[in-house]
Amino acid sequence: MAIDPELFDRCRRADALAWRRLYRDYAGRVFRWAVLRGLRAMEAEDAAQEVLAIAYRRIGQCAAAGAFDTWLYQITRRVVANARRKVWWRRVFAVERVPEPAFVDGPGPELELAVRACLARLPADQAEVLLLADVEGYTREEVADMIGRPPGTVASRLRLGREAFRGLWADLRPDGAASPLAVEEP
């Protein structure tokens, strides 16, 4: 999942072709992070653009290629938090619309919306680790690095989040449909 070190170096040298590739490789992931952290699709698109613009301006602050995903996720967290503060009042007065999917090749809109509904009901710290570990596939150690918490804390949040998700899923999907997340303990 880590960025190719050569691509990282080329981006640090402001190579336009490298940035196009980085955008192609990461825009969808950043968008998905923003949606699954609570933004609507239009807000998430704006947030993803802002995240990648910040990354472009500040890539020299990223220590190494191995730290890039963590660094980019930290930028995403801040941008999403700011966006949520800015748009809360719009949501109060907005007409409800059907959310757009966060995945290009995902589980299907009905299933995705059910997962998003469950994640929205979890405590933010549990939803965040489920997003990174069970949706994006990062290891516990990578998640710990990305959110700046010890691996034990991540493991605890994963356990609690998975347990809570299973309960919410059972309530939301009484037909017994299996969860698309890897919410079973390994």
Image (cartoon, grey):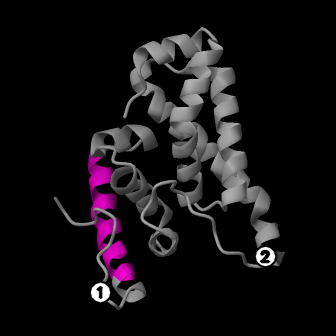
Q: Quadrant of the N terminus?
A: top left
Judging from the image, what secondary structure is the residue with disc 1 in? loop
Query: Which residue in the rendered view is the most extreme toward the top?
Result: 13
Q: Is 143 situated left or right of 74 in this image?
A: left
Looking at the image, which residue is at 39% across and 23% down?
66
Residue pointed to by mark 2? 92
Q: Is residue 60 visible?
A: no
Residue 176 rendering spot, x and y as whole percentages: 29, 86
Q: Which mark is residue 155?
A: none
Q: Is residue 184 visible?
A: yes
Q: Which residues are magenta?
A: 151-169
Looking at the image, which residue is at 38% across and 85% down?
173
Q: Quadrant of the C terminus?
A: bottom left
Q: Residues within 10 Å of mark 2 (few under 14, many from 20)?
A: few
Residue pointed to by mark 1? 176
**Dot 2 amino acid type:** Val
Q: Is 55 situated left or right of 142 in this image?
A: right
In this view, 177 is above or below 63: below
Query: Which residue in the rendered view is the most extreme toward the left?
Result: 186
**Marks 2/1: CA–CA distance:** 33 Å
Looking at the image, which residue is at 42% across and 85% down?
172
State the predominant SS element of the stretch in magenta.
helix
Q: Residues within 10 Å of mark 1 (few under 14, many from 20)?
A: few
**Dot 1 amino acid type:** Gly
In this view, 134 is above or below 122: above
Residue 147 rendering spot, x and y as whole percentages: 44, 44
Residue 167 part of the magenta segment: yes
Judging from the image, what secondary structure is the residue with disc 2 in? helix
For marks 2 and 1, give the one nearer the viewer. Answer: 1
